[in-house]
Image (cartoon, helix red, strand yellow):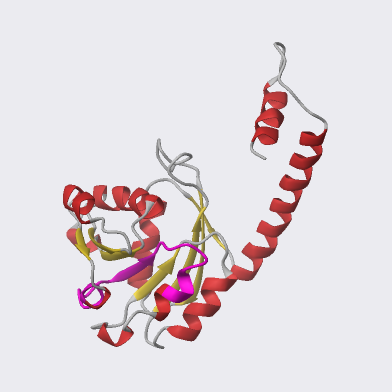
Amino acid sequence: MSSSSKSLKIGIVGFGTFGQFLANTMIKQGHTLTATSRTDYSQLCDQMGIHFFRDITAFLDADMDVILLCTSISSLSEVVGSMPLACLKRPTLFVDVLSVKEHPKNLLLKVLPEESDILCTHPMFGPVSGKNGWQNLTFMFDKVRIKDEVTCSKFLQIFASEGCKMVEMSCEEHDKAAAKSQFITHTIGRTLAEMDIKSTPIDTKGFQTLVELVNSF
């Protein structure tokens, strides 16, 4: 961060592999992080310079700019529903990073206080594809309910400054596009698997890609 005025106080809910992956870059950029999770990550957080809260009430009471939801799709409803949101000290930006988008959008609009902003995102990369940096990797986002444009812009800059391809798209458009691409990928993959495709000593790069696709099923 070139200036402390650009830094954010970010609280991560769900500090598993993906939460840790995002946290590493956020810390590098100079943001202040806190975290909470069902599993006790206090020792790891100490090593990373992150304040870990076992108690969700204390976590929400920590006065954050952004609450980053890094839970699984199946647990999001339970996790958000169990939050004592009255403990929030001020309007807060809630961000999700799930691979589906209409579900978190609808849930957050239903559950969160009206004064809370909502940014639905899908970083289309992870610890493996993003291990050498995020340059040219796609970051999809939808400003579902944003009143504080400054905080939202600062958060998006985390990814833009790392070279991500920033794609603004509605949650509905995202899920339709994702369904089509997944259908095509799985259909082709299953067809190739049934053909018993195997590598040969004279494979082209394109054929190697097909073999890798088959092996992923």
* Viewer-nearest residue: 177 or 127: 127
Which quadrant would residue 216 be assigned to in this image?
top right
Residue lying furthest top: 201
Magenta segment includes 64: yes
**56 to 17, vertically: above or below:** below
* Viewer-nearest residue: 154 or 67: 67
Provide residue 169's location: percent of width, then percent of height: 58, 64
From the viewer's perspective, tell me whether residue 164 is left or right of residue 2.
right
Provide residue 139's location: percent of width, then percent of height: 50, 54
Magenta segment includes 42: no
**174 to 106, vertically: above or below:** above
- Residue at x 52%, y 72% (from the top left corner): 104
* Viewer-nearest residue: 77 or 88: 77
**85 to 181, vertically: above or below:** below
- Residue at x 56%, y 67% (from the top left corner): 101
- Residue at x 38%, y 50% (from the top left corner): 17
- Residue at x 43%, y 45% (from the top left corner): 163
Residue lying furthest front: 39
Provide residue 87's location: percent of width, then percent of height: 25, 84
From the viewer's perspective, tell me whether residue 182 is left or right of residue 82.
right
Provide residue 93's location: percent of width, then percent of height: 36, 74
Which quadrant would residue 54 be assigned to in this image?
bottom left
Instruction: Look at the image and give the residue range highlighted in magenta.
Output: 58-78
